[in-house]
């Protein structure tokens, strides 16, 4: 991949064409570029040029097939911003993020603070919690589709035993999104826990010792020492989990298709539908650009608001 | 690692089992007959696996997933290691900018490139091909970042000693850096492999021919094969699901420590 063998074949001591024993100055200067060229080429072709392409396509009308793609200015954006579909998607996605992120981080911090020791059973539990985060989301979505199936699903069979009526978990627009939040939390929490454990273990023991000498209770110690000192970890997890929430697709696609009645139609699911089911490339691209802008804006807002409260000293 | 308190261990075991119970129960279900499940009975069978592998082509999907994830991992690690080496050891014009551009891709939502990448591949005729599955996800900015940090921690004096002995910079990479960075490279290889194994939206978009389905696409399709029918063949679906998670679970059991260390190092440092 990196065609550098010219240098290797230079026997030490060869000095023709300005080459020193360690290589030609020109070649030496170019070498690092040769090493990064493959990566840079892939990133350019599959990440950066696509951003430009998306922006370009978002101002055009196209269906994949017609030979022309006329420029329509901001029409696609106007269409999106005046559609209930887009606002519904944005609302559903924001709801998902607003509830799933605090749930994930809160639970993860609680569980992590139990699991900081290196005993056998804590390692076992850490492994158990971590397992879903490396398991395929499609499998998890399929398994939970069965758990929450209205007929013959596990949850309803359990409810039947205690005499509760069937609940149409994934068919009721008021419930389906909560089921997805639950499934997403189940899948992702192990990752949060592992990151929190690393953050907690980085807090020096002396701080806890000092606090207990001062007679601080457990809750007091947690609030005054643990919470502020894991702030950088919390900030990191907050950023990535919000970004993740805005990109949820698989569980929606497998479990609900965005239904019932668009109650779980999150942004990427809408993007997939507009782009690859309706083949409306212009509107799909406009939606992708809006998603991009939303995420960049969120990242900026978060770094301004929360960045100041982060304690980097441990 | 010691077993101090059997009671605590038992409690931890129970908590872990309850947490994982949906997955464990689904594996159990994959060994039951559908008739028995719907009648509320128990009947052990391996037939679900036979049907998933044979009639529903999961052997083929398994091969596709192994092949695609394997090549993405090899290519991704090769590119990331080369670039990480350059960023860690050489100062060259634009290095900060190019490294910044690499890291910035971690913050860019990948879905913005979904439609353009589809168009790119359509233009060069690579939709519905292994290359179309493999090329777009191959560059890993995270692995590059991680390996660069790791390589910076390797003393430069080792490089210099090798240069003194007449090694070229590529030889320094292959003979000094790569052997010393092996744990980090292994962690990142796993990270890339698991990500690729589990990826769904890109294979869903890029592949129309069922010959090239990965396990994830095949499983999602199998689950939806009879959406109109009220009774889904859950044991069959769970057999397929088990096939699609088992390789990763086995790999995970073998190298859990490496993986967890890799992920936490990337996040906390």
Image: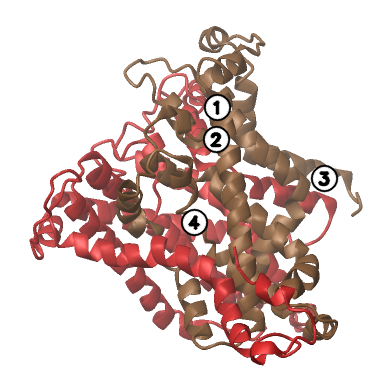
Chain A: colour as depicted:
red
Q: Secondary structure at mark 2?
A: helix
Q: Disc 3 to disc 4, how far (Cα)?
A: 27 Å
Quarter where residue A51 is shown: bottom left
Chain coloured brown: which letter?
A: B
Asked whether the viewer can see residue B267, the reply is no
Quarter of the figure with the N terminus of chain A: bottom right
* Spot occupied by residue B231 in the image (x, y as percentages of width and height): 41, 15
The local crowd at label 2, few if under 14, some if 14 to 19, many if 20 or more residues have their Cα within 10 Å, is many
- Check if mark 3's residue and mark 4's residue have beta carbons within 8 Å: no
| Label 1: chain letter | B
Given residues A44 and A275, the one toward you in this image is A44
Q: Nearer the viewer, residue A297 or B102?
A: B102
- Residue at label 2? B64
Q: Identify the residue position indicated by label 1 in the image.
A: B60
Q: Is residue A86 left or right of residue A220?
A: left
- Which circle, 2 or 3, is nearer the viewer? 2
Chain containing the residue with disc 2: B
- x, y (%) of residue A283? 18, 54
Secondary element type, mark 3: helix
């Amino acid at each position: 991949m990196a065609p550098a063998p010219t240098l290797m074949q230079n026997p030490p001591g060869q000095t023709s064409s300005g080459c020193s024993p360690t290589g030609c100055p020109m070649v030496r200067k170019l070498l690092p570029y040769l090493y990064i060229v493959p990566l840079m080429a892939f990133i350019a072709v599959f990440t950066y040029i696509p951003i430009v392409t998306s922006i370009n396509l978002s101002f055009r009308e196209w269906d994949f097939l017609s030979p022309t793609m006329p420029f329509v200015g901001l029409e696609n954006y106007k269409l999106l911003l005046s559609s209930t579909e887009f606002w519904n998607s944005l609302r559903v996605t924001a709801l998902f993020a607003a509830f799933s992120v605090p749930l994930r981080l809160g639970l993860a911090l609680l569980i992590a603070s139990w699991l900081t020791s290196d005993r056998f059973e804590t390692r076992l539990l850490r492994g158990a919690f971590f397992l879903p985060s490396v398991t395929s989301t499609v499998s998890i979505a399929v398994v939970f589709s069965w758990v929450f199936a209205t007929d013959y699903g596990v949850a309803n069979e359990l409810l039947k035993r205690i005499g509760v009526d069937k609940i149409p978990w994934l068919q009721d627009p008021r419930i389906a999104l909560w089921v997805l939040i639950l499934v997403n939390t189940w899948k992702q929490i192990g990752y949060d826990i592992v990151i929190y454990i690393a953050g907690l273990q980085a807090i020096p023991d002396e701080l806890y010792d000092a606090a207990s000498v001062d007679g601080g209770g457990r809750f007091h110690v947690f609030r005054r020492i643990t919470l502020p000192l894991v702030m950088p970890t919390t900030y990191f997890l907050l950023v990535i989990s919000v970004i993740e929430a805005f990109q949820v697709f698989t569980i929606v696609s497998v479990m609900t298709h965005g239904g019932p009645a668009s109650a779980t139609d999150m942004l990427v699911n809408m993007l997939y539908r507009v782009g690859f089911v309706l083949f409306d490339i212009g509107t799909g691209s406009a939606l992708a650009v809006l998603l991009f802008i939303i995420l960049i804006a969120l990242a900026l807002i978060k770094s301004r608001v929360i960045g100041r409260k982060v304690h980097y000293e441990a | 690692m010691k077993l101090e308190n059997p009671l605590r261990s038992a409690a931890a075991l129970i908590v872990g089992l309850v947490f994982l119970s949906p997955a464990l129960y689904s594996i159990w279900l994959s060994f039951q007959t559908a008739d028995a499940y719907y009648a509320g009975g128990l009947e052990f069978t391996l037939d679900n696996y036979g049907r998933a592998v044979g009639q529903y082509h999961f052997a083929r999907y398994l091969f596709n997933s192994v092949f695609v994830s394997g090549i993405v991992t090899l290519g991704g690690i090769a590119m990331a290691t080369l670039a990480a080496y350059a960023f860690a050891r050489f100062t060259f014009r634009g290095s900060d900018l190019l490294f910044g551009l690499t890291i910035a891709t971690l913050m860019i939502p990948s879905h913005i490139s979904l439609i353009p990448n589809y168009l790119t591949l359509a233009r060069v005729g690579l939709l519905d091909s292994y290359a179309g599955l493999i090329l777009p996800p191959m560059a890993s900015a995270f692995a590059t970042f991680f390996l660069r940090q790791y390589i910076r921690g390797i003393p430069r004096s080792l490089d210099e000693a090798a240069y003194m002995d007449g090694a070229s910079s590529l030889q320094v990479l292959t003979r000094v850096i790569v052997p010393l960075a092996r744990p980090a490279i292994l962690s990142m290889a796993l990270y890339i492999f698991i990500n690729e194994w589990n990826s769904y939206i890109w294979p869903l978009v890029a592949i129309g021919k069922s010959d090239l389905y990965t396990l994830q696409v095949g499983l999602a399709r199998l689950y939806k094969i009879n959406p109109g029918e009220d009774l889904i063949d859950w044991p069959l679906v769970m057999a397929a699901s088990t096939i699609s998670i088992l390789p990763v679970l086995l790999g995970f059991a073998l190298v859990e420590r490496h993986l967890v260390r890799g992920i936490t190092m990337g996040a906390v440092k």
